[in-house]
Image (cartoon, helix red, strand yellow):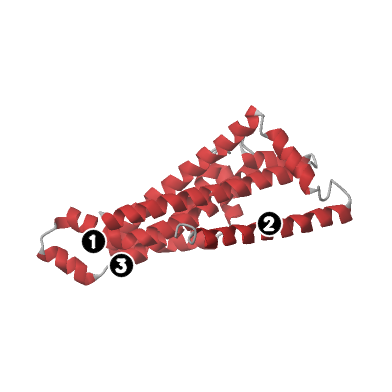
Amino acid sequence: MSRKPLRPRLTACLQRAGVFAFYLTVWAVLARLVNQELLLPSPGAVLGKLLSLLPQAAFWRTLLATLLRTAQAYLLGLAAAILLAGLCCRFRAMELLLSPLLSAVRATPVTSFIVLALVWLSNRRVPVLTGFLMTLPIVYSALYQAIRAVDSDLLEMAKVYRLGRLGTLRHVVVPSVLPAFAESSLAAVGLCWKAVVAAEVIGVPKLAVGSRLYEAKIYLETDSLLAWTLTIVLLSVALEALLRHLASRLMKEARHA
């Protein structure tokens, strides 16, 4: 009986491996046809460059600096979204004032924010602001809609049983909005990570993954450019997988609470 659940997982893993092998083969064939490392290095050359970066302390310091900026932007965005969603649901005037600003944030290209922010802030702080602005609207919108959609019958029942504000928040509101919060948080983390790296490419702070991308482009080091890009993709996948695992555990604990 323990083998049956493994079959779908094994099949899924084999399918993903097959897709990966297909695109890797396409890449290798194209690189061979182009036959110019400057335009399109082979997968082997990119992998070799990445392996040469791994033992370097500067590589890990750069990754850590960008990860810290992303974490700061993401956590600030989550905290602001929770606070503002609660305030806007409580006070109609707050929602009227905030709605145009968030609509403007959604409609404005991220590069415009980066260029404007570089006028006002140092290049170290711009990535944090950019990631924050990408995280806030996504999580805020999901939370605001979820709070508005809380079952009114449950709220009435909470009043009947005299749970109070904190009790109603804990036993009614939080379980109702938790799925929307988890889903929007997962959607936001990838955008936050990419926005931070994009801001680093334009602002070029001292220790940053985006700065290494910019330098690789300037010096025409295509293998290094693709190696850093591969690093960005792998870290993005790892961050989303980690948050998905944490979200699933949080949902399970909330159900058993």
Residue 236 in view of the camera:
yes
The kind of residue tagged 1 is Val
Q: Residue at x 67, y 47 (%)?
A: 230
| Whether residue 46 is situated above or below residue 82 in the rendered picture | above
Q: Earlier in the sequence, mark 1 or mark 3?
A: 3
Q: Nearer the viewer, mark 1 or mark 3?
A: 1
Pinpoint residue 19: horizontal percent, then vertical percent.
Answer: 68, 60
Residue 212 placement: quadrant: top right
- The quarter of the picture where the N terminus appears is bottom left
Q: Residue at x 41, y 62 (%)?
A: 141
Residue 66 placement: quadrant: top right
Mark 3 lies on a secondary structure that is helix
Q: Residue at x 48, y 42 (%)?
A: 71
- The quarter of the picture where the C terminus appears is bottom left
- Residue linked to disc 2: 20
Residue 217 in view of the camera:
no
Pinpoint residue 233: horizontal percent, then vertical percent.
Answer: 62, 49
Mark 1 lies on a secondary structure that is helix
Pinpoint residue 171: horizontal percent, then vertical percent.
Answer: 22, 58
- Residue linked to disc 3: 148
Q: Earlier in the sequence, mark 2 or mark 3?
A: 2
Q: CA distance from mark 2 to mark 3?
A: 42 Å
Kindly check if marks 2 and 3 are in contact, taking CB atoms under 8 A apart as contact. Answer: no
Closer-to-camera residue (43/175)? 43
Q: CA distance from mark 1 to mark 3?
A: 13 Å
